[in-house]
Structures are given as C-alpha cells and as structure tokens.
Image: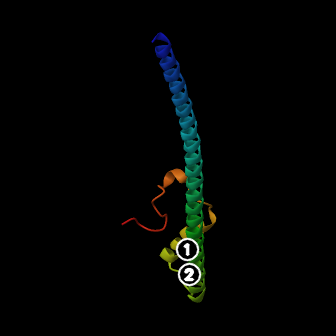
Amino acid sequence: QIEELERIVRLKNAEADMFQLKANEAKREAERLQRIALAKSDKSEEEYTSNYLKQKLSEAEAEKQYLYEKIKMQESSRLSQSSGDPSSMLMYSKIHDLLYSGPPKADSQSNDCHPFRTNP
C-alpha cells in the first residue's frame, strides 16, 4: 500500500510538472503576442500620424495657393486703380507677411484651430 501511495505521489508530481511546463509555455506565448500587438499598435500610430501630417501639409499648401492668388488679384486691382485704398494695402501687407514669414509657431495655436478660419 505504501508503494501504491508513493507511485501516486510520483504520478501527481509528474502531472504537476507537466502542467507547470504548459503554463510556462502559455505565458511565453502570451508575452510574444503582446509584443506583436504593441508593435502593430506603434506602426498603426505612426501611419496615422504620417497621414495626418500629410493632410495638414496639403491643406497648408492649398491655403498658401489661395492666398497667393488673392494677393495677385489684389495687386492687379491695386495697379489698375490710380489711388490705393489704405485698408486694402494693409490687408495686402498682412497676407504677404503671412505667406512669406514661414510656418506659424506651434505654441501660438492649438492643433484644432486653423490659422485662417474661425472655429464654429
């Protein structure tokens, strides 16, 4: 009977070892999957940021083109008139400064606020 109990104890120890190996294996697999998910999340975030910045650049280029065309129209209008209107000259000067002064400062505007439009 003692031999029978010792055999059962060895069997239970072997069973416990087997379950421990399976648990360790499952833990390693979970860590591997977690690393994969984190890498995919990082890549997705980078792609989103890249696409967002491309969109903002495209919008800025369109706005620049619009302002350039507006300046050209005002300049041709100003040249066609013999006396210049001071308020239109001031607007021309401001638009010209905006176009050629470089990008706006990041801390002076929030990301949601477009520099040439008012928020609703």
Q: Residue at x 45, y 59 (%)?
A: 112
**Nearest the camera: 4 or 65?**
4
Q: Amino acid at mark 1?
A: Tyr
Dot 1: few (<14), some (14–19), or many (≥20) neighbours within 10 Å? some
Residue 58 shows up from this direction? yes
- Say which label, 1 or 2, has the lower sequence index: 2
Disc ID at residue 71: none
Farthest residue in the bottom direction? 80
Q: Position of residue 17 (x, y in %)?
A: 54, 25
Residue 93 shows up from this direction? no
Q: Position of residue 34 (x, y in %)?
A: 55, 43
Q: Position of residue 113 (x, y in %)?
A: 45, 61
Quadrant containing the N terminus in the rendered view: top left
Q: Residue at x 56, y 75 (%)?
A: 67
Question: Which element carries disc 1, helix, strand or loop?
Answer: helix
Quadrant containing the C terminus in the rendered view: bottom left
Dot 2: few (<14), some (14–19), or many (≥20) neighbours within 10 Å? some
**Up-down: is 39 above or below 28?**
below
Residue hosting label 2: 74
Residue hosting label 1: 92
Kindly indicate the quadrant of the structure image that contains residue 50: bottom right
**Nearest the camera: 87 or 110?**
110
Label 1, label 2: how far apart the Cα atoms are? 7 Å
Question: Which element carries disc 2, helix, strand or loop?
Answer: helix
**Up-down: is 1 above or below 57?**
above
Proximity of marks 1 and 2: CB atoms separated by less than 8 Å: yes
**Up-down: is 9 above or below 109?**
above
Farthest residue in the front direction? 1
Q: Amino acid at mark 2?
A: Gln
